[in-house]
Amino acid sequence: MFLPVLLIPLAAWVWSRLLISRADGMAGTWSRTLILLSGWMVCITEGLSAGYALEQQWLMVAWVAFLLTGILLLKDRTLLWTFTLPAIGKQERWFAGWILLVLMLTGVLACVAYPNNWDSMTYHLTRVEHWMQRQTVIHYATNNVRQVSQPPLAEYWILHILSLGGIDRLANLVQWTAWLISMISIWGILGVWGMSRKVQWSGVLLAAALPMAILQSTSTQNDLLAAAMMLQSVYWAFRVRNGNRQAVWWMLTAFSLAVFTKGSNYIYLLPVLPFAAIWVLRQFGWSCWKPALFGLAVLLVFNGPHWVRNHDTFGRWTGSDKTLVNDSHDPNQMLAVFLQNLAMECQTPISGWNRALTNAVMEIEKGTGVLPGEPTINWAPSPSFSVGMSSLHEDYTGNLLMVILSIVSLFILAGRYRKHPAVTLALMVVSMAVLFSLLLKWQVWHNRLHLPMLLLFIPAVAVALQYLHQHVRTGILIVVAAASIPWLVFNQSRPMVGKESVFRHYDYYQYFFNQPELLRTFLQLAAVADRNQVEKLGWATSGDAWEYPMWRILQDQEPEMRHVLVGNETRVFERSAWQPEGIVSNRAGLVALPRLQCHGRNYYRTYTDGQWAFFLPEPNL
């Protein structure tokens, strides 16, 4: 029964009514609502987790209490202002209509399509299943350390949705909602700068036409939520810049939630902090210790428990993989990473252009003394650098038009609007890109990590476009919107039309869109578990193996699933007293064995299919 999940949108609506303010407008109201609900959700998750009580009934109690509190407060409050839709011109109506159409199509797709993103199958959704089974978010033994080490805000939202609703398709709405709020925040930032509605509509249209955002809006990744939290941080920072002292509390809370969403936000926040500190100092003077203390407090409240769990397990607060960090910070090597990241955003359907761009980057690297595939700045598991064909996949797609507009905008802003706050934002984003290239090794999947930077830069682009002739500006926006249609309709993982359309296939088939060869294997493995009435299923897999589909296939049997034969730091949580009644493995060293031993018990291989095998316990003689 999915009705309990409606408590979340109901609570959002009630509290948004409480937070309405004429001064803040729609953007400020929904930003506050997102921050407030996210903070509440983190607190009840950690609180219930401490008592091993993360289950539907207690989550319902928490959300009902939150909803009733809002209703009681709303009952005693006179609403001084509410949202009104201003009259808009013909062009703005066309823009609004297109944006609404995009949101409707992606919203329907998000509700219909089953999750199938690679990372979701390996850790985003898998960690949620482990939390629900264990009724706690404390670390556990796992062969995929990302299931426990990564910042979990997006997965906390998914945890609440799945616990209350039980329908995993609804988990896609976390990203979709984050995209919607990102658009509202872009509108808000431009409003804080005093820009006209035409400029605001331009910014929202650019966000609605961004290829990577379109693809991710129907997935269960976390890049759009990471971008949304960064946009909240920047929005409130500019409110502080404009003299709003109350905005500082929301800004600092948004900072804390941003780093609780994704590790790359640590990097993206660094260029924002100096500007924010200066603006806070201007507003508070010697009393700036008060917001500083508040910021430290909310940072520890939201991130502290997860940091402690990571430190106790990995010896590092962030738990991040140290192999992802550049071994060298040489300027030439940083330039190489920067150019490779930029080139990957410029992929086109023209193979000759892509080859020329690849060769140009490699020639520049060669001229600066950087070797092709230099291991100190290129992540080993990633394929070698090469600009591929334009992709419709959420892990690889580029954003060529946005890159071109961003570069052109930099020249326009530098020449015309040097004192405009858009220049400050542009400086922030460029600094983010430089730090990103300085600190992280290049990998082919970086395009999705660039999404927060691209969305953050859109307000600056919208300001720069107003310098152009009206017809030129309108033509650019129409081209950008029209060019986004392939990503909207032909999403490689969740296509709307064609023989692979999500409207034509059942759930199991959709789970394996990105790994179709695994469908038969997982069904066979599940059949072996079901036939042998396995109630304790061990998972002895590699560090990036698919796992989530097995949870869904066996959801009626509800076996207890744990990782076994763990070889990383989380092995301290593996309990030898727990003896599985069956073991699934895709490790080459184990699959090839006719027998293996686990927790003092012998197992024999009863089924194998390619790289996967199923082991059953040998009978006691």
Image (cartoon, helix red, strand yellow):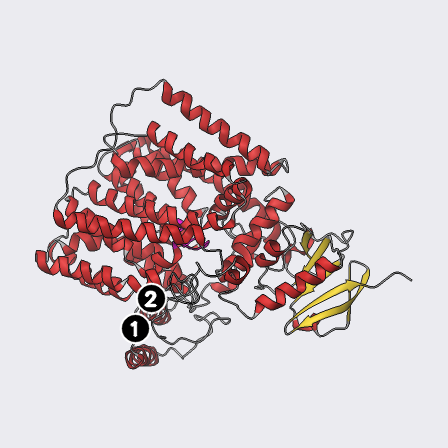
Residue for point 38% across, 49% down:
176
User: Mark 1 — residue?
Assistant: 348
Residue 301 in view in this figure = no
Q: If the image is split into quadrants, where does the C terminus sit?
A: bottom right
Instruction: Assess whether residue 218 is covered by the magenta stretch.
Output: yes
Residue contact between numbered discs 2 and 1, judged by CB atoms under 8 Å: yes
> Residue placed farthest to the top in the image?
76
Q: If the image is split into quadrants, where does the N terminus sit?
A: top right
Q: Earlier in the sequence, mark 2 or mark 1?
A: 1
Q: Position of residue 142 (x, y in %)?
A: 63, 56
Q: Position of residue 80 (x, y in %)?
A: 25, 23
Q: Check disc 1 and give the amino acid type.
A: Thr
User: Mark 2 — residue?
Assistant: 398
Local crowd at mark 2 within 10 Å, few (<14), some, or many (≥20)?
A: many
Residue 513 in view in this figure = yes
Instruction: Assess whether residue 241 is covered by the magenta stretch.
Output: no
Q: Check disc 2 and give the amino acid type.
A: Gly
Could you give the CA–CA distance between mark 2 and mark 1, rounded to whole angstroms? 8 Å
Q: Position of residue 378 (x, y in %)?
A: 44, 71
Q: Which residues are magenta?
A: 217-226
Q: Is residue 435 left or right of residue 600?
A: left
* Majority secondary structure in the magenta region: loop
Q: Position of residue 309 (x, y in %)?
A: 58, 46
Residue 553 sits in quarter: bottom right
Label 1: which secondary element: loop
Q: Is residue 51 above or below residue 348?
A: above
Residue for point 76% across, 59% down:
532
